[in-house]
Amino acid sequence: MKLRCYFVYPKGYKDAVGINRIKEEMVSRRLEVIEPLLNDNKIVEEFGLDRYYSNETWTVARKIWTQRLKLLASSDIVISWVPDFDYIPLEIPIAYKSKKFIQIISPTLHPSFSVYASEKQYFTNIDNWIHRRDYKWRK
């Protein structure tokens, strides 16, 4: 049985090389990758909108986040790519509260990461994550 991995990253980075490297590694680790942004796009198309934040209505927002929370609940693992300090996914605290296994990949050392990801599940870049070289927190 494959573990289901909820993979969250900022919408603006959707087509980045780094995102593809992370997804390829997940597949090589035999994880089933759940990408909430792909589901968001289907919902946006269903409502005839051209992009996620264009003229967003309560109905669209509710449908997107209801779907995201269902996907998150169905996952075993949460992996988050946080390329800069300005973006911390809303799903991370929810996953933490739900006692999900969380890994964070980010060059920015945000204080909340010390709570959300266990000591050995924070990685400063994609290569470190791929080769399982976790960040060594100072005591």
Image: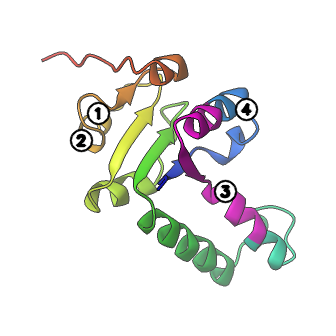
The reply to whether residue 55 is visible in this rendering is no
Task: Magenta stretch: give its range.
Answer: 22-42
Judge depth for marks 4 and 1 and give the one in front: 4
Look at the image and say whether residue 118 sits in the magenta stretch.
no
What's the residue type where badge 2 is placed?
Val
Assess disc 3: are there few (<14), some (14-19) or many (≥20) residues with their C-alpha within 10 Å of its C-alpha. Answer: some
- First in sequence: mark 4 vs mark 1: 4
Give the quadrant of residue 20: top right
Q: Kindly check if marks 2 and 4 are in contact, taking CB atoms under 8 A apart as contact.
A: no
Q: CA distance from mark 2 to mark 3?
A: 25 Å
- First in sequence: mark 3 vs mark 4: 4
Report x, y in % for residue 94. Answer: 36, 60
Q: Residue at coordinates 36% horizontally, 44% vertically from top-left? A: 102
The reply to whether residue 54 is visible in this rendering is yes
Residue for badge 4: 16
Residue for badge 3: 37
Q: Residue at coordinates 76% horizontally, 63% vertically from top-left? A: 41
Q: Kindly check if marks 3 and 1 are in contact, taking CB atoms under 8 A apart as contact.
A: no
Q: Residue furthest bottom?
A: 59
Residue 111, label in figure? 1
Q: CA distance from mark 2 to mark 4?
A: 27 Å
What's the residue type where badge 4 is placed?
Ala
Q: From the viewer's perspective, is residue 93 above or below residue 46? A: above
